Structures are given as C-alpha cells and as structure tokens.
Image: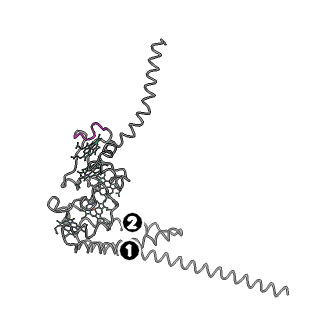
Amino acid sequence: MKPAHLLHSIRILVLLLSALPLSVATAAAQEVVCITCHGAMPGKYGEPVPLWKTSIHAENGVYCHECHGGDPKDAANAMKPERGFKGIPKETAIPETCGRCHVGVLKDYLGSPHGKRLGSGGPTCVTCHGNHAVKKASLELINEKSCTRCHPYERARLMKQAMQETEGEITVLDARIQGLKSHGKPTEEMEQGLFDARNRFHTLFHDVAVERLKSESSAIRKELQLIAAAIDALDQAEQKRKMAGVVAVGGVLLAALLFRLLAKSYHS
Ligand code: HEC
Ligand code: HEC
Ligand code: HEC
Ligand code: HEC
Ligand code: HEC
C-alpha cells in the first residue's frame, strides 16, 4: 500500500472512530428532541415538560409527539407541518386527539350530554384529566370543585355515590381473594370474574347517564355477590380444614399423654 493510501485509510479510521461515540450520543438525544429543547425553555413553553414527567403517559412511553405530532428525532425539523406537527390541539379537536388511543372512552364521551356539547359549553377530556400531568383515573375526579364549574353538583353527587359503593365492594373482594391466594387456594376463576366486572364498571362514567349507571351498577353488583359467595365457600372449607387439623393434633397429643401415663404406671 502506498504511504498516501495508508494515510488516507488511517484518516478514515480515525474519522469513523471519533464519529462513533458521537452517533451513539445523538441517537439517545434524538429520541427526545421535543423534551430536550422545551425542557430548557422558560414559561409556558417549558412548563409542559416537568408536568408531563409526572404523568401516567410518561410512565408508559407516550411522548409529546403522540398528541402534538411532529418529528421527535430531528431537532431542526421537529415542528414542521410536513413532519406531521399539529401544534396545540383546538378545543374541539382534543377528544379525537386523546381518543386515537382511548377508543372506547371517546365513543362513550361523544354519545354523552358532555360530548354533544363539545365546543358549546361541554367539558373536553382535559377539563377533567388535565393535559400534561394526566394521572391514573379514579372517582376522586368527581368532586364539587371540578363538577360545579358548569352545573350544580347534585347529579354528579348521585353518580359518585352509586360508583363508590360498587368500588368499595370490589376493593373488599379483591383483598379477600388476595388473602386466599396467599394461602395457595384456587382463586383463578374468581379473579377473572372480578377483573371483568371491574373493567365493565370502570367504563360506566363517560356516558354520564345517572339512570343507566344505577341499573348497570346493580347488575354488576349481582355478579359481585356471586363472587362473594364463592369466596365464602372457600373460606368455610378452609375453616373446616383448620378445625379438622386442631382435632387431629389434639387427638395425637391425647394419645401421647395416655401412652406416657400408661408407661409410667407400668414401670412403677
Ligand atoms: C430546537 C427547539 C425545539 C424543538 C426540538 C421542539 N420545539 Fe416546540 N417550540 C419551540 C419554540 C421556540 C416554540 C415557541 C415558538 C414557536 O411556536 O415556534 C415552540 C412551540 C411549541 C408548541 C406550541 C405551538 C404554538 O402554536 O404555540 C408546541 C405544542 C410544541 N412546540 C411542541 C413540540 C413537539 C411535540 C416537539 C417534538 C416533536 C417540539 N415542540 C420540538 C422549540 C422547539
Ligand atoms: C396526552 C397528550 C399530550 C401530551 C403527551 C403532551 N401534550 Fe402538550 N398539550 C396537550 C393539549 C391537549 C394541549 C392544549 C391544552 C388545553 O387546551 O388545555 C397542550 C398544550 C401544549 C403547549 C401550549 C401551552 C400553552 O400554555 O400555550 C405546549 C408548549 C405543549 N403542549 C408542549 C408539550 C411538550 C413539550 C410535551 C412533551 C413533554 C407535551 N406537550 C406532551 C396535550 C399533550
Ligand atoms: C398514543 C396513545 C395515547 C394518547 C394519544 C393518549 N393516551 Fe392516555 N394513555 C395511554 C396509555 C398507553 C396509558 C397507560 C395505560 C392505560 O392505563 O391504558 C394511558 C393512560 C391514561 C389515563 C389513565 C387510565 C387509567 O387506567 O386510570 C388517562 C386518564 C388518560 N390516559 C387520558 C388521556 C387524555 C386526556 C389524553 C389526551 C389529552 C390521552 N390520554 C392521550 C395512551 C394514550
Ligand atoms: C366530566 C369529566 C370527564 C371527562 C369530560 C372525561 N373524563 Fe375520563 N374519567 C373521568 C372520571 C371521573 C373517571 C374515573 C371513572 C372510574 O373510576 O370508573 C375517568 C376515567 C378515565 C379513564 C380510565 C377509564 C378506564 O377505562 O379505566 C380514561 C382512559 C379516561 N377517563 C380518558 C378520557 C378521555 C380520552 C376523555 C375525552 C374523550 C375523557 N376521559 C373525558 C372524568 C372525565
Ligand atoms: C365545562 C363544563 C362542564 C363540566 C366541568 C362538567 N360538566 Fe357535566 N354537563 C355539562 C353540560 C353542558 C351538560 C349538558 C347540559 C345539562 O344537562 O346540564 C352536562 C350534563 C351532565 C350530567 C347530566 C346528564 C343527564 O343525562 O342528565 C351529568 C350527570 C354530569 N354533567 C356530570 C358531571 C360530572 C360528574 C362532572 C365532574 C366530573 C361534570 N359533569 C363536569 C357541562 C359540564
């Protein structure tokens, strides 16, 4: 190999080697250009980042571009419309933005008195859940402060009451099943039943139809009663087994005692 060629090869090698750690570093940064850039910005453009970091979305890898569009891997073109950037969703576009992933909720919402008033006084998803710091949903979201922004609390209170009772039953049954499970009891069927009932129960809210909520809750509670009966039966079988155990151990002890007494009287 001519010295010039050798030199050329070495230069290419050096270039390649020096580029290597750089390309690894940019690959990592490329994942999050929205976060890197916005995270360093003051005010309303920076605020979404720390809020989002506390969200269930951050926990599950749902990044900025899932709601705003854009290219999260290319800082120079991240917010180009050609890369799918949509900017801040308009109020009327929020439900479909979220509903791309929460399909069932979107359907219930659109059919509800809330969804029918989208853009004319009805709440959107972010009215109740917030936009960036979205947390795991619970009945805490139904509260006087949030629900009286537009109408009296009475109907909201009725919904919460009906849901809290069912929620309470589900929690109690879950704890009992976990107890039996930790003692090695066969609980698969009950667990499945409770899982299904809980899922159906948690789809009831977005219709905001108080009467339907009440009737469906009572159907779900009938199912919960069946599960409770199955747990009772397992519990009773367990009690009986324990009693039998106590009786058996007692019998053995008694026999041992008798034997010793006999042995003593025999030796004396
Ligand atoms: C290199 C820095 C930088 C990157 C990368 C970047 N942004 Fe921005 N972003 C800005 C600046 C600066 C503004 C405010 C001025 C403007 O609208 O251009 C902004 C504004 C926004 C707005 C508000 C737009 C409006 O209409 O007011 C949203 C939403 C947004 N960015 C989301 C994103 C998303 C999503 C990504 C990643 C796909 C991203 N940004 C990547 C710097 C950046
Ligand atoms: C789950 C969907 C979702 C995710 C994820 C999300 N945003 Fe947003 N963002 C929204 C919605 C919806 C709005 C409009 C807010 C409203 O109307 O209440 C918004 C508004 C904004 C605004 C405008 C704020 C203002 O006050 O004008 C910026 C900037 C922004 N988002 C940046 C980001 C950045 C950066 C990320 C990632 C760290 C991000 N968003 C992640 C849904 C999201
Ligand atoms: C790219 C898909 C995607 C988009 C868009 C999205 N989410 Fe989510 N969301 C998820 C995932 C994934 C989870 C975590 C797993 C789960 O609980 O379903 C989640 C969880 C949630 C939860 C908690 C659910 C629970 O079980 O308690 C709420 C509430 C929620 N999102 C609301 C919203 C709202 C409001 C928007 C729009 C501003 C939105 N999401 C946009 C994917 C998305
Ligand atoms: C009027 C307030 C309100 C509005 C509007 C609203 N939600 Fe909810 N959302 C709630 C409440 C309250 C719960 C908790 C219900 C429960 O615990 O059963 C909830 C639960 C959820 C859950 C978890 C439910 C599950 O199946 O586990 C998701 C996801 C969700 N909402 C997404 C959305 C999306 C997306 C929109 C818009 C299309 C939306 N919500 C609109 C109040 C609201
Ligand atoms: C942004 C305004 C707004 C907020 C916030 C809001 N609602 Fe509503 N709600 C409406 C509108 C508009 C209607 C339809 C007109 C009416 O019935 O008053 C409605 C109707 C209802 C109805 C009646 C449905 C029927 O068929 O009679 C219930 C129940 C309800 N909302 C529950 C809630 C609960 C629970 C919350 C809090 C988690 C809440 N709302 C928060 C605007 C709102």
Q: Is residue 201 above or below residue 59?
A: below
Residue 102 screen position, x and y as percent = 29, 56
Badge 2: few (under 14), some or many (20 or more) residues near its Cα, within 10 Å? some
Element on which disc 1 rests: helix
The span picked out in magenta is 74-81
- Write down the quadrant of residue 83 in the picture: top left
Residue 56 screen position, x and y as percent = 35, 56
Left or right of 12, for residue 252: right
Residue 183 screen position, x and y as percent = 53, 70
Name the mark on residue 160: none
Q: Is residue 72 above or below residue 259?
A: above
Residue positioned 51% across, 69% down in the render: 185
Q: Amino acid at mark 1?
A: Glu
Residue positioned 24% across, 52% down in the render: 97
Element on which disc 2 rests: helix
Left or right of 262, for residue 38: left
The front one of 229 and 85 is 85
Name the mark on residue 195: 2
Spatial distance from mark 2 to mark 1, Cα to Cα? 13 Å
Left or right of 13, for residue 133: left
Residue 230 screen position, x and y as percent = 44, 75
Name the mark on residue 169: 1
Question: For residue 14: magenta?
Answer: no
Q: Are marks 2 and 1 in contact (CB under 8 Å)?
A: no
Q: Is residue 11 above or below residue 171?
A: above
Q: Is mark 1 within 8 Å of ligand 4?
A: no
Residue positioned 29% across, 74% down in the render: 162
The front one of 193 and 60 is 60
**The C terminus lies in quadrant:** bottom right
